[in-house]
Amino acid sequence: MSRIGKIARRTFLIGSAAIAGGVAFGVYKYNEDPENPLTSEGDKAVLNPFVFVDENGITLITPKAEMGQGVHTTWAALIAEELDVELSQINVLHGPPAVAYYNSALMGLALPFLDYEVGKFQDNLRGYVGEAGKLLGIQLTGGSTSMKDGFERMRLVGASTRETFKLAAANRWGLDRADLSTSAGMVSSSDGRTATYVELAAEAAALKPPKVDLRSPNEWRLLGQSQPRVDMLAKVTGTAEFGADIRVPGMKFATVRMNPKRSSMLRFDASETEKMAGVERIVDLGDGIAVIASNTWLAMQAADAIEITWQDANYVETTEGFFDQLAQGFDGEVNATPREEGDVEQGFAGTEVYAEYKMPFLAHSTMEPMNATALYTAEAMTIWSGSQAPLSARDSAAEAVGLAPESVDLIVPYLGGAFGRRGETDFSDLAARVAKAMPGVPIKTTWSREEDMRHDTYRPPAIARFKGVVTEGEAVMLDGQIISQSVLDLDGANRENVTGSFDQPYGIPNYRIRGYLAELGVPTGFWRSVGASINGFVFDSFIDEMAHAAGRDPLEFRLELVRREHAPSATVLETLKNMTNWTGQTPDGIGRGVAFTYSFGTPVAEAIEVQDTGNGIKIAKCWIAADPGFALDPSIVEAQLFGGAIYGLSAAIMGEITFADGEVEQYNFPDYDALRMHTAPEFDVRILENNKFIGGIGEPGTPPAAPALANALFDLTGIRARELPLIKTFDLIT
Amino acid sequence: MQPLSTHIIRAFPDVLIDPIASFNSIKIKLKKEGSVSFKLTVNGVSHTVDLPAEVPLLWVLRDEIGMTGTKFGCGVAACGACTVHIDGEAVRSCQVQVADVWGDVTTIEGLGQPDTLSILQNAWLENQVAQCGYCQSGQIMQAAKLLADNSNPTDEDIDDAMQGNLCRCGTYPRIRAAIHDAAKSMGA
Ligand code: FES
Ligand code: FES
């Protein structure tokens, strides 16, 4: 039976375990369970450890990587809420990779705990995240699942831990647990006795945690309020340690050059390079080279000076070639038809709408270039890697150097942006392989920006063909076909590459979406909001085209269709209408567009106002309304929404990776730029909490950004952009 | 070589027209015997390093001295992650060779530590600006220079001064708010 099936049948119990100088609390599990990464071996009762209380205070061990999304803060708040401690009393550590830290939401267990009706949208979401979990290994920070994953478990751990401390104090004082109270990390009795959790830790370790009920949201002190982020002080003082900042005594600095045509290496000549300043070692990696030097820049200069002959690409070599391949793929088999309502083939009277959309390859271009540090010896390896999937990164790095996974420790520092890129294992593998060349010497392998941009796992390009019919102002039929390369390694029907189009809450009576797959041979991967980042643009642009064909106001047209399916989504659109004082009219020189995408369980509507300055078009303003169900930390939710929109807008305006001779033509930010201070619009964000369950927040801000802008540009110019990036069609200020 | 003031430099596609040429232009052949001893003052502390003259200040700070608050983002003056001050001027440390450092260097570590925050860093904290945080040292150093020159910047002044500093997480709205707040606090 699959691992998903096994885990789905488990129930969570809270347990405790004695540790040196204190106690650990976590999820208690039985025999077949994964090994506990934090307590000594031989202990049958395996704990999924989340909280340590010892002489150092209260420490939260989070399996979630902090890549900017604020997860360390919100997970700390989830625990602190029930534990009755202040956020400032909690230290947050990122735990080691361990099977015990599986991501329950990604494992297809999304949202088991809230009383909502599983509508088709939620169901689709579950199927999707389950697939993602299979691919990336189960300890993963991505797919906007962190809050779904932690929402119940972290509060349960907090509550059980609190009650265990009360029990310990009750035993010590000969009182009843029910008569004791807790606050700020301390148990108090009505007669004035007090004991801190730290003082009670040893006694608590001997107790079985009592069963607890969770507090209702109206009793929350911390959740629902913006908290100071636990990582902020370090990030404004330059003291936050990213992967690139790892310092280990005696370390050397390396860089790599791998084939930009993504195949093998024929030969290289490093005779000049060996003599260059600071160079310690040239490493033949077989499929590329590494230079180990006394500093990173010297390593990069030397690597650049090596003459390398690369094997040709195993793919078609040019951008046009890839798009031809995609177009031909429509003649092949349908891979998935995840939505088929009514009968789109029946023949309709009315106005037909037809559009074909083209989306390019995109790079992630995280601010921190790919890197990792490794210390290899013949028996073991320690690797420091900003990984979104530390478990698979550890296993993969171990395999790359021929060690058993248990012999490898992987430490996750802060991630300088991830957006899906750091779910890959390539940068950890390379660092491990480089370190193997100098056993006993810690080596940091940092990619140049050029290497990073030209060796990404890109968002795949896609083509979409959409047909629709409007009759008397109503959408009666929508029939969409989408083709791209899959980012999932799955057999059979794959809904991921049509996500964002088949799963939209639109009450169109005849509604079909079909997905097709092409094998392009270029490495592609998860890119913030994944399929929804592509199909959000396609689907919503097409809805806008249908609205205009129907002679309807685009916002009212959407609202009417969404209202039939999903009330919280309709409220999001209504809220946007009020925020923007939407009239459907704009003065000359101003354009407005609206877009809506339901992704990762969160409906998001965005509106954009563009302005023709006479000197190029400026994106003046962006309004966002979103409903993640619970806004556990409104400040973080807001930041993720506007940050997600900026990420989407950057790509929509100027993001494009192109190929010539099998190589990516973009090298660095000057040829793959993004929004900056002067081009980012002003934002107005409104967060709603009508959805009955908790949705993701790191990704849903991205999909509606591109169509909102394209629709605004149509309003301004009358030109419909069906190809991204928009800079190809419009004179946008960059 | 003329010091590169980040206040003026904007490395955008119009500046670096040919990516391959720009990539190759930073290729400099170095010989082992090329090392020279350099004395630097960083945040008031003096350091001596033995290095080829061409090594950029960024890598001297990060790899040689071990001060990692200053970040590497692009190496071609296009992102601002490596911004530091030399004699009060904001510069891209990836573009200043160690031999050309003409004065005292101030990095993010010198602007204020967790227990000695500058007004500007405190405004960043109050506005909860950082997301991943990787670009923020550079953003703060650039903003510090802006406020040193202009105690009450308009939105347009902020656009002009900050547009060389990329943030892939998109923290721009809060950077803007933090600069305005810091300007107010400094004036008060
Ligand atoms: S690293 Fe110096 S500007 Fe990007
Ligand atoms: S905060 Fe992540 S790049 Fe700016």
Image (spheres, coloured by chain):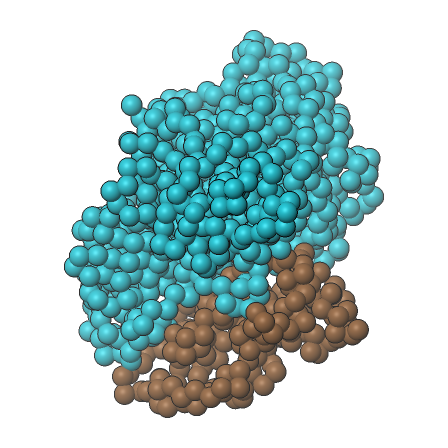
The answer to which image quadrant residue A553 occupies is top right
Q: Closer to the camera, A15 or A382?
A: A15
Hey, which residue is sitting farthest top in the picture?
A: A346
**Total tally of numbered discs in the picture:** 0
Q: Residue at x 57, y 60 (%)?
A: A232
Q: Is residue A378 left or right of residue A682?
A: left
Residue B32 can be seen, yes or no = yes
Q: Residue at x 70, y 27 (%)?
A: A570
The percent coordinates of residue B28 (x first, y second) are: 36, 77
What is the drawing colour of chain A? cyan
The percent coordinates of residue B95 (x first, y second) are: 48, 76
Q: Closer to the camera, B136 or A611?
A: B136
The answer to which image quadrant residue A336 occupies is top left
What is the drawing colour of chain B? brown
The percent coordinates of residue A361 (x first, y second) are: 45, 45
Q: Residue at x 47, y 88 (%)?
A: B46
Residue A324 can be seen, yes or no = no
